[in-house]
Image (tube, helix red, strand yellow):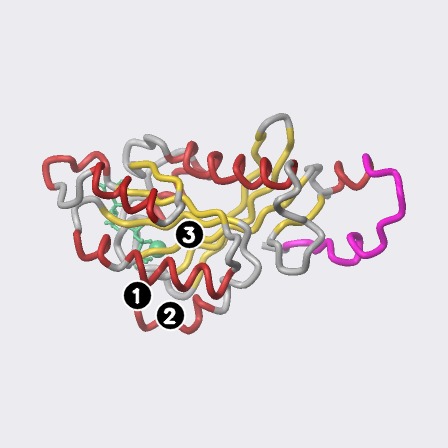
Amino acid sequence: MSETYDFLFKFLVIGSAGTGKSCLLHQFIENKFKQDSNHTIGVEFGSKVVNVGGKTVKLQIWDTAGQERFRSVTRSYYRGAAGALLVYDITSRETYNALTNWLTDARTLASPNIVIILCGNKKDLDADREVTFLEASRFAQENELMFLETSALTGENVEEAFLKCARTILNKIESGELDPERMGSGIQYGDASLRQLRQPRGMQTQNKQQCNC
Ligand SMILES: Nc1nc2c(ncn2[C@@H]2O[C@H](COP(=O)(O)OP(=O)(O)OP(=O)(O)O)[C@@H](O)[C@H]2O)c(=O)[nH]1
Ligand SMILES: [Mg+2]
């Protein structure tokens, strides 16, 4: 059974180990906190169909391992991603200091046009905070990133982070800034869009891939 959606966006979740990337993905997909989350080995995959601005969008999300020893494996998944959640832990300055490296990787290996939302996770641990909201929002502004503080534990701003990123990509498609037909855009037309187009688009059909995950 094929699902009906207008677009498919490839997303990455990147950032240092232990920042809560897998918990964020789990909270987004399952609507609950992932207890006893272990370090991700390589990459994990999740997908969810969401409604954004009247369009149905399938998010195909690659949750990457933050540990250095998996870096060469995870980097191979960056190519052609349309969006990314770049995650740090508000209680760990070390994970915040690493953001520049993650950002460089995302923009060079995925695409210079990749839409990135910075997520300061573990918002619920405000008493242990090492990075202020203001400092991170300045960093986001300087680096042209969207920004939210999230909690995979309480669920606060988790869905918002994924949806904000998807909405921005959709706006860029509608304004012509992003071309879904460009190779490596990380965007594909879904069945619903293809039906609406009402003209032969051989290339798109060929490019349309089924994910068996
Ligand atoms: N208090 C709190 N703890 C969290 C939150 N998100 C994750 N954690 C905890 O942080 C630890 C790491 O979470 P993971 O989601 O496995 O971290 P990760 O970024 O996927 O780590 P790698 O896979 O190694 O890159 C776990 O012990 C989680 O329980 C959060 O929002 N609040
Ligand atoms: Mg993980």
Is 54 magenta? The answer is: no
Element under disc 1: loop
Task: Please give the label number shown on residue 67.
Answer: 1
Dot 2 corresponds to which residue? 71
The disc labelled 1 sits on which kind of residue? Answer: Gln
> 195 or 146, which lies in front?
146
Q: CA distance from mark 2 to mark 3?
A: 13 Å
The disc labelled 3 sits on which kind of residue? Answer: Val
User: Is the residue at mark 1 in contact range of ligand 1, meaning its CB lies under 8 Å from it?
Assistant: yes
The disc labelled 2 sits on which kind of residue? Answer: Arg
Magenta extent: 196-211
Dot 3 corresponds to which residue? 13
At which x and y percent is residue 20? 30, 48
Q: Do tag 2 and tag 3 residues touch (Cβ < 8 Å)? A: no
Residue drawn at 44 percent across, 37 percent down: 30
User: Is the residue at mark 3 in contact range of ligand 1, meaning its CB lies under 8 Å from it?
Assistant: yes
Q: Residues within 10 Å of mark 2 (few under 14, many from 20)?
A: few
Q: Quadrant of the N terminus?
A: top right
